[in-house]
């Protein structure tokens, strides 16, 4: 059975002080919910957050990293640096990185492998643009992104990572995919993993949906057996709202 995951992606929001205030409020609400709960914060807040979250069961993640351990890469942060401050997760290949920072499938592959090599859990994002969807290319686009991201990994590594299907047109737009649309693509992703590896790996890998997830629609996504949780942007910025999402996944986990 796959444990549900609710991961918040704060993007470029929250100072260190704001991050710590958030965590205090969140920790007061979220106890042992049976949900893998992750907060992906800006780099500056990571060290303070991991220290404060220690022993709480709340995982702390970065939103990006370089694949090299160290080097002359001005402005970059390495997996070794993340591990040194007890970070456990890292988002890789978010569409905002692909679009605004020209991140390629090859870089996503290097980051995914490097994260796993450094005992970080990569949350690997894939998803089509509106134009690609309207042209009927969703499956093809997602296929290429998934295959390139996991290429060369061992089965055990694929079982450990988390995939997130985030249609670009649903991110921050208030226009979420329907549960059926999301479920169909996530089923397709599981089939890609099964074809590349085997059914067992496909059954083990967690696949999240992301894109305008909020308390009003989370139950619908989680009602789909293929959707293992959510990667949440806007609705993760408020601790009370994010708590509602974790509790919804907790209820869902109990029912499954
Ligand atoms: O990483 C999270 C996604 O970009 C979703 O963002 P959103 O929930 O604000 O649409």
Image: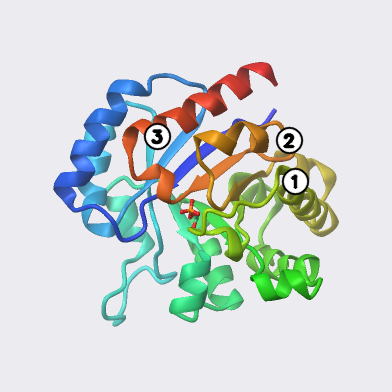
Quarter the C terminus occupies:
top right
- Is there CB contact under 8 Å for labels 1 and 3? no
Task: Give the alpha-carbon distance from disc 2 to disc 3, as whole Å.
Answer: 22 Å
- Give the SS element for disc 3: helix
- Give the SS element for disc 1: helix
- Is there CB contact under 8 Å for labels 1 and 2? yes
* Quarter residue 63 falls in: bottom left
The residue under the point 71% across, 49% down is: 182
Residue 183's disc is 1
Q: Which residue is mark 2?
A: 224
Quarter the N terminus occupies:
top right
63 or 100: which is nearer to us? 100
Residue 204 visible: yes
Looking at the image, residue 173 sits to the left or right of residue 150; the answer is left
The residue under the point 32% across, 72% down is: 70
- Give the SS element for disc 2: loop
Task: Give the alpha-carbon distance from disc 1 to disc 2, as whole Å.
Answer: 6 Å
Task: Give the alpha-carbon distance from disc 1 to disc 3, as whole Å.
Answer: 23 Å
The residue under the point 26% across, 50% down is: 46
Where's residue 141, x and y in %?
Answer: 73, 71
Residue 93 visible: no
């Amino acid at each position: 059975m796959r444990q549900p995951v609710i991961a918040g992606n704060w993007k470029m929001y929250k100072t260190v002080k704001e991050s710590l205030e958030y965590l205090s409020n969140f920790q007061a609400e979220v106890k042992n919910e049976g949900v893998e709960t992750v907060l992906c914060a800006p780099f500056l807040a990571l060290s303070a957050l991991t220290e404060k979250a220690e022993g709480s069961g709340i995982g702390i993640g970065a939103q990006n990293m370089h694949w090299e351990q160290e080097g002359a890469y001005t402005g970059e942060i390495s997996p070794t640096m993340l591990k040194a401050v007890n970070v456990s997760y890292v988002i890789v290949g978010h569409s905002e990185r692909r679009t605004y920072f020209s991140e390629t499938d090859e870089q996503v592959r290097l980051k995914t492998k490097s994260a796993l090599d450094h005992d970080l859990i990569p949350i690997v994002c894939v998803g089509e643009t509106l134009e690609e969807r309207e042209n009927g290319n969703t499956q093809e686009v997602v296929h290429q992104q998934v295959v390139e991201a996991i290429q060369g990994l061992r089965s055990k590594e694929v079982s450990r990572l988390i995939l997130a299907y985030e249609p670009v047109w649903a991110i921050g737009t208030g226009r979420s995919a329907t549960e059926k649309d999301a479920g169909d693509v996530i089923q397709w992703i599981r089939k890609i993993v099964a074809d590349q590896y085997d059914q067992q790996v496909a059954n083990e890998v967690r696949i999240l949906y992301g894109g305008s997830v909020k308390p009003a629609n989370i139950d619908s996504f989680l009602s789909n057996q293929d959707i293992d949780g959510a990667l949440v942007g806007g609705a993760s910025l408020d601790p009370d709202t994010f708590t509602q999402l974790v509790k919804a996944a907790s209820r869902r986990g109990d029912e499954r």
